[in-house]
Image (tube, rainbow, N blue to C red):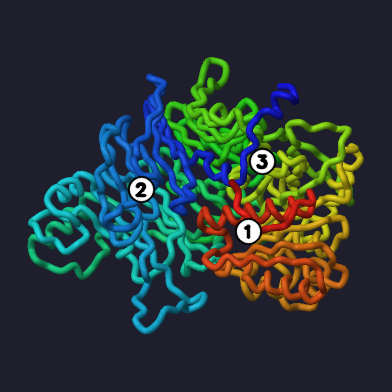
Amino acid sequence: MNNKSQQSKYKPTVKDMFTLPYTGYSTINPSGTRVAYLRGIIDLKENSFGAYCHIYDCDKKLDFQLTKDAYASNIRWIDDDTLVIIKYSPKEGNRQIFLYDNLVGDGLQLTNHSSSINNFEIFQEGFIFLTFEPAMNKKIGNFAHVEEEEGSSKLYYLNTKLAKKNISLRSNFFEEEKEDLPKPYFELTQLFDESFHIDSFVVSPKEDSIYLNCRKKPDLHFQDTKFHYRIELDAQKVLDRFEGYRKSGQDVQDYSFLGEVKKLALPRDANILAVSPDGDKILLKHKGRDYKDQTQGDLWILNIAENEDNLDDETTISDALFCLTHKLDQEPAEVQWTKTGIYLSYWNESICELARFQENGDFEVLDLQDLSIKYFFDFNDKGEFCFSAYSANKLDEIYLAKKTDTNLKFEQLTNFTDQHSSWDFGTVESIKWKSKDGEEIEGILRKPSDFDPSKKYPLLFIIHGGPAASSPLTLLEGSETIYKPSIQMSNKGVIILSPNYRGSTGKGQRFRELNFDNLGVGDLWDIESGIDYLVEQGFIDETRIGCMGSSQGGYISAFVGMHSSRFKAVSVGSCAASWYTYYITSDVRDSILLAGEPFSKEREASIKKTAPIAGIETANTPMLLQHGANDQRTGIANANELFRALKHKGVPVEFIKFNDAGHDYGTPRNYYALMLQNYRWFSHYLLDEELDLFKDDF
């Protein structure tokens, strides 16, 4: 396409970005004839995020919207024609399970629970589902016992047939029984004498057992001190037992008949992710080397059947674990174990790939034809699969893949890219350069569609969070629709560079730990060397360079703004200002990538050289601070610290506090304000426009 036709394209506003649809989870039915997927929307007027469930009929090549309201999640096929969904129930004012027989109607609401259903899985003629319920009724005040609150998870089984029968005769089977009807549900967590937090659960394909990933307290600080259970369950026998109690008028005194519980002596950081199709093995993610934040996780197989008598023996279990990913030096992302193999997505630099593993660790990378997985994928037992993906010239779309004699045949099921073909998104490409210490750094470069290499352009760095994450090679990343004004700045003639700096995923273990004890400093090497590389290409105006990011990206933006003189302005979201402040305010305080104990002398030198606030004496870069008042990850004291220091020194600084936000910004209107403020900030400092952070965008 020539420059003239590119220039005639529509240049979307900040507000336009919030009208873009996006894909969520997708799932293929057993015969491969239908794909159900979530189509996400952002509603600025209602100030809500939502998702509709759509069905694509592969034979008829027809797409239709199943749910009327945009509140769908956790979609699962029972059979080729029956779907189960979690969606919002106006009656309960929370999320409940709905059944769609023959994919018609509004769905039959199967649960009327007082708490929202978090997620569910199909199990023995019904479902296992998880809720998080209040641990105690605090009648004397609204308070929390910091890091001492007990977990409040409840795990239930629900029989679909009995639930449908009850629903036809009573409005709410979670209320006290008023009819002579069998009880359709029971609570599995009554098996335990104590409360705890269930992070997640996995059901065996044999539908005879459930595996639990638990921790004692819900605080994220305890996320790497897990314990694990297996519950063996015959749901029908349990329901019959409850029916016997009901008919006899007896109260249940002992709940041990609910199932047989076995505690598994797995590593403390382990997450059970899947069970083999025959039910004999489990697949778990675990850091085999150590428990440090910079260490990649691996996938491990444990043969449960062969170690049945020693599941509570830590030494036996440790020796029995087999590292499935010992030939893959990348962090596993999503995983699914089917009859045709173990499928795993992972980042390879800025592309998320999909591979099929054999149980001995051998694997083949599937050829996705330049597409990058957006995490979500789902296989049926025939080896057919659906997935969401994007590329350098495609928006986020849903695809279906089927095997041929020689390769995979792909069908694109959605057409968001075509629907927005008149919009100007510029161009994106992957580039590489050498950092100060010779390390190769990769990043995503976005250019205006009318780019002219003979001109000089302002440069804006947009830094991803993490640091264990990656900026993807895609025409449009999700955060560019709600937070990063990449498209708007590019369409005004600004070059955008999103570096996958040291510590990012996609380049193996060695690269992941390059920023250990060198935070900020090494990041600045990567960013300033990126400036040098682009300046050598001849199209960058060195006097107009900006940097923005949130979380780890906010920390890096604050660091470069405080320690470098090469930036015209920076924007800092949800940042850490100093490691003392971070440690005392963060719910993941032990994640600091520095050697030594938090307040030890060993850390003094590292803290001084790696904290943004340590550069206050020479700081002169204008800074926009954006922070949630209720941020538990990087407490708002961090933003206060930078604001007061810069204000006192006379450096231009603006501080926007989002009163109802946490570490993320929660609502579409908050994100709209956030994105608009960044757009106005850099339009002023990089393009000399008048600064009005609160000017709307039409």
Q: In this view of the protein, which residue sits in the foreground, 448 or 207?
A: 448
At label 2, the amino acid type is Ile
| Mark 3 crowdedness (10 Å alpha carbons): few <14, some 14-19, many ≥20 | many
Question: Residue 694 got which mark?
Answer: 1
Residue 293 in sight in this render: no
Q: Quadrant of the N terminus?
A: top right
At 63% from the left edge and 67% from the top edge, which residue is drawn?
Answer: 634
Question: Residue 86 got which mark?
Answer: 2
Q: On the picture, is 277 further left or further right than 524?
A: left
At 52% from the left edge and 28% from the top edge, which residue is drawn?
Answer: 415
User: Which residue does the numbered mark 3 point to in the structure image?
Assistant: 472
| Mark 2 crowdedness (10 Å alpha carbons): few <14, some 14-19, many ≥20 | many
Quarter assignment of residue 362: top right
How far apart marks 2 and 1 lie (CA) works out to 38 Å
Position of residue 605 measured from the top left corner of the image (x, y, whole percent): 83, 72
How far apart marks 3 and 1 lie (CA) works out to 30 Å
* Mark 3 / mark 1, whichever is N-terminal: 3
Mark 3 near mark 2, Cβ–Cβ under 8 Å? no
At 34% from the left edge and 76% from the top edge, which residue is drawn?
Answer: 137
At label 3, the amino acid type is Pro
Question: Residue 547 got which mark?
Answer: none
- Above or below — where is 660 with respect to 123? below
Q: On the picture, is 188 further left or further right than 172?
A: right
Q: In the current view of this chain or complex, which residue is farthest to the bottom?
A: 140
Secondary structure state at the residue bearing disc 2: strand
- Above or below — where is 626 with respect to 308? below
| Mark 1 crowdedness (10 Å alpha carbons): few <14, some 14-19, many ≥20 | few
Residue 393 in sight in this render: yes
Q: On the picture, is 63 further left or further right than 606?
A: left
Position of residue 275 measured from the top left corner of the image (x, y, whole percent): 44, 44
Mark 2 or 1: in front is: 1
